[in-house]
Amino acid sequence: MISVVGKNGNPVSVKINHQVEGGKFSPDGKYLVLYGQPLKVEPRNAQVTFLTLYAFGGGTKKGFARTYGAGIYSADFSADGKYLVVSSVSAIDVLDIASKNFEAHDPTYVPSFSMDACNKH
């Protein structure tokens, strides 16, 4: 169980079945994506990486989970929050959040839509 604080400032606890190596909130604060290796890591063997998408509002719930056979470099939302772009060792995957459909692309793929940018003040 981890506790996260969303855009509204309220802490929420979510249960995860993997370590957290990275993560991000969607621009509108409705979703949180977390990714990382299994809780029990076997250092002598190659490890999978788990990705979990959580939906907020009306109670926190797991919206989607996916297992990758190799490391995840990043998981970023589109500027409009409709897509999640996952960059891994072997591909760029685009998740349509509403339909939960993934499209796999080669590692050099650049999405045609605008990506969320981190705004630092």
Image: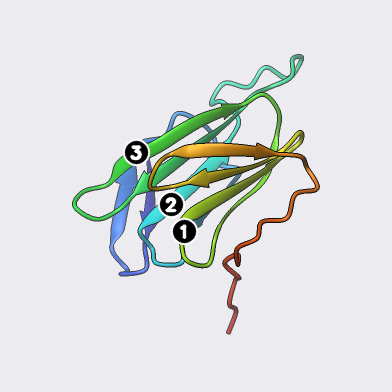
Q: Amino acid at mark 2?
A: Leu
Residues at discs 2 and 1 in contact (Cβ within 8 Å): yes
Q: Look at mark 3 in the image and give the residue it sits on.
A: 62
Nearest the eye: 37 or 92? 92
Percent across and percent down for residue 113 are 60, 63
Nearest the eye: 64 or 95? 95
Residues at discs 3 and 2 in contact (Cβ within 8 Å): no
The C terminus: image quadrant: bottom right
- Residue pictured at 39% horizontal, 67% vertical: 28
Marked residue nearer the N-terminal end (3 or 2): 2
Q: Amino acid at mark 3?
A: Lys
**55 left or right of 76?**
left
Marked residue nearer the N-terminal end (3 or 1): 1
The single residue placed furthest to the bottom in the displayed view is 121
Q: Look at mark 1 in the image and give the residue it sits on.
A: 25
Q: Residues within 10 Å of mark 1 (few under 14, many from 20)?
A: some
Q: Look at mark 2 in the image and give the residue it sits on.
A: 32
Marked residue nearer the N-terminal end (2 or 1): 1
Percent across and percent down for residue 58 are 19, 52
Report how far apart the C-alphas of labels 3 and 1 lie in the structure.
Answer: 14 Å
Percent across and percent down for residue 87 are 68, 45
| SS at badge 1 | strand
Q: Amino acid at mark 1?
A: Phe
The N terminus: image quadrant: top left
Please determine whether, in this image, residue 110 is positioned above or below residue 51.
below
Report how far apart the C-alphas of labels 3 and 2 lie in the structure.
Answer: 10 Å
| SS at badge 2 | strand
